[in-house]
Image: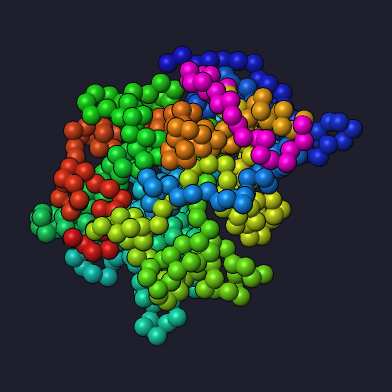
Amino acid sequence: MSIVEQEPTTATAEGETHHGTLIPRGQDAVPRSPLFEGRFGRMFRSLPAPRHDRDALIALGKAMADREAPSGDNPKIPSAYTYFGQFVDHDITFDPLSELSKFNDPDALTNFRSPRFDLDSLYGNGPSGSPFLYEFAKADRRGVRLLEGRNPEDSPFERRDLQRNAQGRAIIPDPRNDENIIVSQLHHAFIRFHNNVVEKVAKAQPALKGAALFAEARRVVTWHYQWVVVHDFLPRIIGEDLANELLPDAGEPQLRFFDPREGAFIPVEFSGAAYRYGHSQVRPTYDLNDIVVGVPLFSAAKTADEDILGHLNGFRPLPALWTIDWRHFVEIDGSQPQLTREIDTQLAKPLLKLPGSIDGANTGLPVLNLRRGKALQLPSGQAVAQAIGATPVSNLGLDRFNLSAAHRAALEAETPLWYYVLREAENAPRNGQRLGPVGGRIVGEVLVGLLAHDPQSFLRQQPTWKPQGLKAVKAGHFTLGDLLRFATIGQ
């Protein structure tokens, strides 16, 4: 593989203006990451980054709230897939060190999560390396089953939850999987899925004990999860045509722009822009089950502790009666679940005013995303479109916003990649139901590429493998609905 070398570009860190210049806050010379060395990197390494004014990004971000006519629902994608996408992200990426206040070179950023669909966010370092995650009290399942939390019957909390410490924080490998009630319960569902698979495997192969039983159960769980990622989740997000092009039924995956063969990495065009399409899918409220309905994302009270039943914030025990009935989030046995919102440039209003613990500056999620894109020096949407041979979007919709003429002109000439991905999804013929050429290409190639170059994936170990042994609506297939049904019912 040829490596495109180029001269480093000089860039000052984002800061306050003084006599027309930017005051550097950190590195004042940032290389354009010429090597595939870091666990983060670039997909389009030769494309330059726009030099957007900070105020232009803030103005655009603040304008991306629901207007008088909120976004409609997406009939193609049930709401569980929003949080499954978050769960997948936590499985393959974790960057706690980069900052918004200065430019970040992707090759200098460390991804503290393996860039593979290996569920290390669920299994940690295994029974030996992370024994606190596993059952050791029962002799026949020592180091085989994952631990659940159990609350007393007279507790104000649900009986079954994640195991938690005295402060109510979940004892799991990735704390981000406890950041809201929905992803927390999805993590819990994966624990139950693993434990039910353990019993299924033990019954089918009684000779397997201990470490061998755990290894086989983990393989079954992981391969079914991987199947859901590329054969259920991905086609819904990027469309079946592109998904089939990238991962044909027969033959090798067809990747044009992402090649992790020399070391798996996460492109910042994916993590910092394209995969953040999911923020547009978030609903302002959710029904958890038949009883607990219309719960908002964040509390209207000054502090979440004042209103423990009025929000979906995580990092706390699950309130009584709040166990999610997954039939409200994905189709199970003919249910009619809540749907995601359309993928577009309007975000639910709660995301424009995040709790102070999340957004100390109270600028909102769109502003944070746009500033993050600048800090990572992401290329413009038009530049990526031209690089992949797609026609750049002409109708960017910026005339809907109260932007100055100068800001609008700059943003139309070089549109921030995250906004561009949302806008091309919003435009016809996709109409908010799936990603467009740029967003779909980035997300599709990364998800397929990571799986294709993982030596332990089903795609490498057994390319003709299809799901079997676990109940599914369609033989030889397996969906998120099938997974959650097996997790909660066990058959």
Residue drawn at (58%, 46%) of the image: 346
Give the image quarter of residue 25: top right
In this orientation, does residue 276 appear?
no
Color theme of the render: rainbow
* Residue at far right of view: 19
Residue drawn at (56%, 15%) of the image: 5
Check if residue 155 falls in the magenta segment.
no
Q: Which residues are magenta?
A: 383-405
Of the pair 144 and 476, the residue shown nearer to us: 476
Residue drawn at (46%, 62%) of the image: 286
Of the pair 290 and 443, the residue shown nearer to us: 290
* Image coordinates for residue 283, horizontal then vertical, percent: 50, 55
Residue drawn at (21%, 68%) of the image: 139
Q: Looking at the image, is 207 positioned above or below residue 101? A: below
* Image coordinates for residue 448, horizontal then vertical, percent: 36, 32
Q: Looking at the image, is 246 positioned above or below residue 432? A: above
Of the pair 130 and 99, the residue shown nearer to us: 99
Q: Looking at the image, is 419 positioned above or below residue 349? A: above
Q: Looking at the image, is 108 positioned above or below residue 480? A: above
Left or right: 43, with 13 as reference point:
left
Identify the image quadrant of the C terminus: bottom left
Left or right: 301, with 268 as reference point:
right
Give the image quarter of residue 456: top left
Left or right: 93, with 351 as reference point:
left
